[in-house]
Image: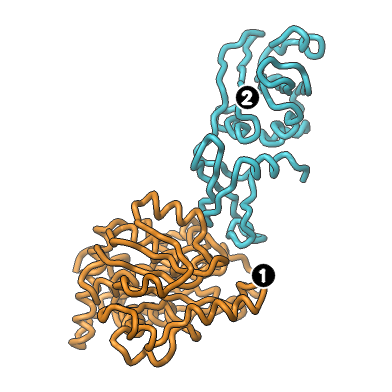
């Protein structure tokens, strides 16, 4: 699985039902070790904390074993081995390969080479489908549905793969309206924007959050990285205007607005938001485990229970 | 085929004639077809001859080789109006216009430097899907980058 667009709404609904089931099992402390015969390779050529650890936790909860390396330096890639050879080797060792790489298209290339299924855990600035599934599931968990909501997506929409994948994922549903809120320099790439419109999303681009904040049901925040700005003064200016504080939220937002963030956060959301009912990003991170458990089960065992 | 061209190159007995190539692109057409001259084929190249449709045009004649339609369609990226004549015993037995292939593999490089198809020492060929025909637009199947007709022509016609 390479892109969130490889799935249908039905596939996602099925995944979400299975995630509900896994969540229940986890709460009850009663998780069957249904993957005890499986070995899962975690091929993270690029650093990751949450995605790698939640996949590893998910695999272990279901009784699977994992083999892993954590960055290119740690393995023979640093001795000059090609990506293709590394994937072939892992294909020989494991039943499923989870790949993250800084090059766009790496997971698709891995899937062409390997016989085992491949899960894309992030390829460059392109796709991050399991994050998108998690984001959509979190919204369903918090709001009961993804349809009919007004959703704001804020931050680096140009280079951030999480935001792009989330938006592509939303095309499987019928949100009422999507606001794309970003500085001019970090607007969504035109090819993604076209795709969203073709697929029927009602989107509007703007620079300022405050104008639309009162309308939002969901605010999806991503990090704005300093290194994306040629002029640091521009960055400092932009950073301030996208910062979310509890004061701002209490004065403008709907009471039941929920804020999501793929994490890690730097200072785009103040710490004083964490203890409010708006903050949903830690819930979102926690749901990553049951969602990935459900995904591993569906991929390795199919639909049977 | 107009009369003046006969002054330069005589008819071939068996093989393929590619006509209506934009002036100056005959060598690029051969390069896309993978014909370097080392195959021993007899190849005639006519450049910058008059054409009623194009003003000036190039023509390529390849003796003794019938080109696969799928292969020859690749040249539509730089010669969208080209016509291909299959010659048997001095007669045109088949004639068709090139059309852009749905998948283009190998001849164009992805413009995105962090596309996996650009990574050195990997056994991977760049691969694009056709997303629009007029103008031609290709999309990299690996990284999703879009490459425009102008970029394609520039890449293929610049000397490498």
Decide: few, some or many residues near mark 1? Use Cα within 10 Å; few <14, some 14-19, many ≥20.
few
| Quarter holding residue A217 | bottom left
Q: Colour of chain A?
A: orange
In the depicted structure, whether residue A1 falls above or below residue B25:
below
Look at 38% across and 59% down and name the residue there. Answer: A203
Residue A8 percent location from the top left of the image: 29, 56
Compared across the picture, whether B5 is left or right of A174 comes to right
Identify the residue under disc 1.
Answer: A80
Q: Which chain is disc 1 placed on?
A: A
Task: Give the alpha-carbon distance from disc 2 to disc 1, as whole Å.
Answer: 45 Å
- Let me know if residue A63 appears in the view: no
| Chain the render paints cyan | B
Q: Secondary structure at mark 1?
A: loop
Q: Are marks 2 and 1 on the same chain?
A: no
Identify the residue under disc 2.
Answer: B82
Look at 60% across and 34% down and name the residue there. Answer: B74
Nearer-the-camera pick, A267 or A3: A267
Compared across the picture, whether A47 is left or right of A136 comes to right
Look at 36% across and 62% down and name the residue there. Answer: A169
Q: Secondary structure at mark 2?
A: loop
Residue B26 percent location from the top left of the image: 73, 29
Residue B142 percent location from the top left of the image: 52, 55
Residue A119: numbered disc: none
In the depicted structure, whether residue B120 falls above or below residue B86:
below
Q: Which chain is disc 2 placed on?
A: B
Where the C terminus of chain A falls, by quadrant?
A: bottom left
Look at 56% across and 37% down and name the residue there. Answer: B135
């Amino acid at each position: 699985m390479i892109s969130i667009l490889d799935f249908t709404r039905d596939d996602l609904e099925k995944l979400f039902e299975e995630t509900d089931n896994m969540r229940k099992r986890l709460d009850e402390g009663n998780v069957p070790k249904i993957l005890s015969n499986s070995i899962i390779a975690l091929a993270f050529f690029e650093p990751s904390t949450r995605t790698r650890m939640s996949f590893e936790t998910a695999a272990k909860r279901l009784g699977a074993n994992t083999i892993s390396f954590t960055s290119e330096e740690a393995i023979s890639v640093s001795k000059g081995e090609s990506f293709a050879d590394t994937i072939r080797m892992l294909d020989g060792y494991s039943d499923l390969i989870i790949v993250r790489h800084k090059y766009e298209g790496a997971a698709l290339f891995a899937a062409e080479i390997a016989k085992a299924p491949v899960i894309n855990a992030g390829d460059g600035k392109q796709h991050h489908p399991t994050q998108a599934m998690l984001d959509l599931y979190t919204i369903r968990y918090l709001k009961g549905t993804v349809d009919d909501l007004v959703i704001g997506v804020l931050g680096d929409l140009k280079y951030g793969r999480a935001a792009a994948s989330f938006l592509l994922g939303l095309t499987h549903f019928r949100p009422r309206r999507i606001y794309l809120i970003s500085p001019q320099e970090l607007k969504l790439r035109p090819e993604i924007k076209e795709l969203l419109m073709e697929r029927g999303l009602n989107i509007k681009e703007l620079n300022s959050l405050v104008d639309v904040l009162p309308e939002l049901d969901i605010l999806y925040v991503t990090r704005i990285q300093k290194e994306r700005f040629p002029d640091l003064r521009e960055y400092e200016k932009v950073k301030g205007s996208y910062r979310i504080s509890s004061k701002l939220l209490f004065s403008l937002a709907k009471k039941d607005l929920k804020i999501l963030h793929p994490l890690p956060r730097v200072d785009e959301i103040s710490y004083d938001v964490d203890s409010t009912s708006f903050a949903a990003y830690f819930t979102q991170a926690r749901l990553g485990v049951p969602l990935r458990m459900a995904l591993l089960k569906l991929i390795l065992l199919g639909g049977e229970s | 085929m107009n009369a003046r061209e006969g002054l330069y190159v005589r008819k071939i007995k068996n093989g393929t004639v590619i006509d209506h190539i934009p002036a100056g692109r005959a060598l690029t057409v051969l390069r896309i077809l993978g014909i370097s001259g080392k195959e021993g084929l007899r190849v005639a190249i006519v450049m910058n001859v008059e054409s009623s449709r194009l003003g000036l045009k190039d023509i390529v004649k390849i003796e003794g080789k019938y080109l696969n339609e799928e292969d020859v369609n690749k040249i539509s990226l730089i010669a969208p109006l080209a016509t291909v004549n299959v010659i048997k015993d001095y007669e045109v037995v088949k004639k068709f216009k090139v059309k852009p292939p749905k998948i283009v593999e190998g001849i164009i490089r992805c413009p995105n430097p962090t596309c996996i198809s650009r990574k050195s020492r990997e056994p991977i060929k760049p691969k694009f899907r056709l997303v629009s025909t007029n103008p031609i637009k290709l999309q990299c199947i690996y990284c999703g980058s879009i490459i425009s007709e102008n970029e394609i022509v520039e890449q293929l016609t610049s000397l490498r």
